[in-house]
Image: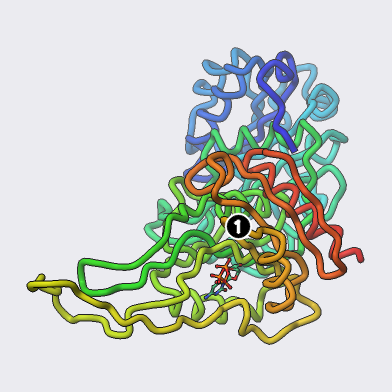
């Protein structure tokens, strides 16, 4: 799904709902980004949000009076929610607290913001922000799942990181620029069709230590896996990412497990697998590791040196097949692309393999584009043209949908 460009946003009416969280200050930056791109932004705050940030801040950024009271005494207030709902092309609630989410999930028109949302028939984006324990609470999970199942409702997942409360976990409001991209994706017709999927993505190389300062590795940078994690989470999946490389910016909706070696990756994959509905094994796993790990730095000596390598486990190849799980592998090859990829598809009992020729400059390591061929067990092949790794990720997620329905 390509994203809407700035020009399509000129004069689009956006209703930005702000509820009472410390993350309310980020909504100011979101309002600024929306206004800068030409959207008309109308802010509605809950009364607790006004304790965190002054309505004047939003007034200054949007040029519009901010609504925050259901009945503030003016002549128009009795129907303000209907007027606001009618005008909007998109409603965005950022930050959305557990309380606001609960009100929306129950259809409770308790304040101006919840009443306006219930009166609206335009797409609604809910961007949760709360403590990780609260975000993990079954009540909040159920409310969000319920909201996400309604037509026209989208959950912009939070990111993992340190929160104002000092705890670390999933619950930080997605950064304003990512949130704005998410809104543009919704306006361009994006769909959260992977809601309910629990996707496990592996990405990047493994690092096989020789001694405390040296390791064996490969040229993978993790870009393809990070794109998959980003797209799957945006489309509504719960995503766990296992990687030796920390993504350059937090991926909304994604829990990260950092590993180093193939053995550590295998442990992380096996730990997450019982809760996984789709495995996307994009990592470039080292097939060998040094047989011995030196405890201190190896000193050079006269003459050559030899390192004995022993086999790493084949993580994908040694999984017990599970017909309820979709298992998708990757084959990065420099020659005999289709034959090698087809062999791996059969040998590892995969539902699909993504073959790519990494000898090409525009589809190899460390670039933002890729050209892949999708191979299926029934012999079908689907060659995709050169495209961004994000678009390749979209195409792979489309196939998850197709495979689920077949
Ligand atoms: N893979 C794995 N464990 C390994 C090696 C690879 O799980 N030890 C996974 C990769 O993540 C990928 C698929 O298997 O999804 C194919 O990986 P690739 O390195 O292309 O193939 P190999 O099976 O290692 O075969 P070869 O290196 O001989 O090409």
Q: Is residue 324 above or below residue 330?
A: below
Of residue 96 and residue 150, the one placed in the foreground of this image is: 150
Total number of numbered discs in the rendering = 1
* Position in image of residue 142 (x %, y %): 73, 64
Of residue 279 and residue 339, the one placed in the foreground of this image is: 339
In this view of the protein, can residue 112 be seen by the observer? no
In this view of the protein, can residue 76 be seen by the observer? yes
* Position in image of residue 304 (x %, y %): 17, 72
Q: Residue furthest front?
A: 303
Give the quarter of the image for residue 237: bottom right
Instruction: Classify the position of ligand 1 by quadrant: top left, top right, bottom left or bottom right.
Output: bottom right
Position of the C terminus by quadrant: bottom right
What residue lies at 31% left-to-right and 82% top-to-bottom? 308
Position of the N terminus by quadrant: top right
Of residue 346 and residue 40, the one placed in the foreground of this image is: 346
Q: Is residue 326 left or right of residue 55?
A: right
Q: Is residue 393 above or below residue 340?
A: above
What residue lies at 46% left-to-right and 52% top-to-bottom? 221
What residue lies at 59% left-to-right and 49% top-to-bottom? 227
**Is disc 1 surrounded by few (<14), some (14 to 19) or many (20+) residues within 10 Å?**
few
* Position in image of residue 73 (x %, y %): 71, 22
Q: Is residue 123 above or below residue 291?
A: above
Q: How is the image coloured?
A: rainbow
* Position in image of residue 223 (x %, y %): 52, 49
Read off the residue under disc 1. Answer: 335
Q: Is residue 227 left or right of residue 352?
A: left
Q: Is mark 1 within 8 Å of ligand 1?
A: no
SS at mark 1 in the image: loop
Q: Residue furthest right?
A: 406
């Amino acid at each position: 799904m390509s994203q809407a460009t700035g020009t399509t946003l000129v004069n689009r009416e956006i209703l930005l709902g702000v509820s009472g969280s410390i993350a309310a200050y980020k909504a100011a930056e979101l309002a600024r980004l929306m206004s800068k791109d030409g959207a008309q932004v109308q802010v509605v705050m809950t009364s607790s949000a006004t304790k965190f940030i002054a309505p004047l801040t939003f007034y200054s950024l949007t040029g519009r009076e901010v609504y925050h009271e259901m009945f503030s005494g003016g002549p128009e207030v009795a129907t303000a929610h209907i007027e606001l709902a009618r005008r909007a092309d998109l409603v965005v609630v950022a930050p959305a607290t557990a309380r606001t989410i609960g009100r929306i999930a129950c259809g409770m028109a308790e304040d101006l913001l919840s009443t306006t949302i219930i009166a609206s028939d335009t797409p609604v984006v809910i961007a949760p922000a709360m403590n990780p324990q609260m975000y993990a609470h079954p009540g909040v999970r159920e409310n969000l799942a319920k909201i996400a199942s309604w037509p026209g409702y989208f959950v912009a997942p939070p990111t993992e990181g340190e929160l104002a409360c000092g705890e670390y976990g999933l619950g930080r409001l997605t950064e304003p620029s990512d949130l704005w991209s998410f809104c543009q994706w919704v306006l361009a017709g994006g769909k959260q069709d992977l809601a309910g999927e629990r996707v496990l993505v592996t990405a990047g190389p493994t690092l096989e230590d020789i001694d405390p300062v040296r390791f064996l590795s490969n040229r993978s940078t993790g870009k393809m896996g990070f794109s998959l994690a980003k797209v799957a989470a945006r489309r509504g999946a719960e995503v766990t990412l296992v990687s030796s490389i920390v993504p350059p910016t937090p991926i909304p909706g994604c829990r990260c497990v950092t590993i180093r070696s193939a053995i550590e990756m295998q442990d992380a994959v096996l730990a997450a697998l019982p809760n996984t509905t789709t495995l996307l094994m994009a990592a470039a796993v080292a097939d060998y590791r040094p047989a011995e790990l030196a405890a201190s730095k190896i000193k050079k000596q006269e003459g050559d040196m030899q390192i004995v390598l022993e086999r790493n486990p084949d993580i994908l190849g040694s999984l017990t097949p599970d017909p309820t799980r979709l298992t998708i592998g990757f084959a990065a090859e420099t020659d005999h692309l289709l034959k090698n990829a087809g062999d791996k598809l059969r040998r590892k009992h995969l539902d699909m393999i993504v073959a790519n020729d990494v000898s090409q400059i525009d589809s190899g390591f460390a670039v933002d584009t890729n050209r892949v061929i999708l191979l299926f067990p029934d012999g079908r092949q689907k060659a995709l043209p050169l495209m961004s790794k994000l678009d390749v990720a979209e195409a792979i997620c489309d196939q998850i949908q197709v495979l689920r329905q077949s």
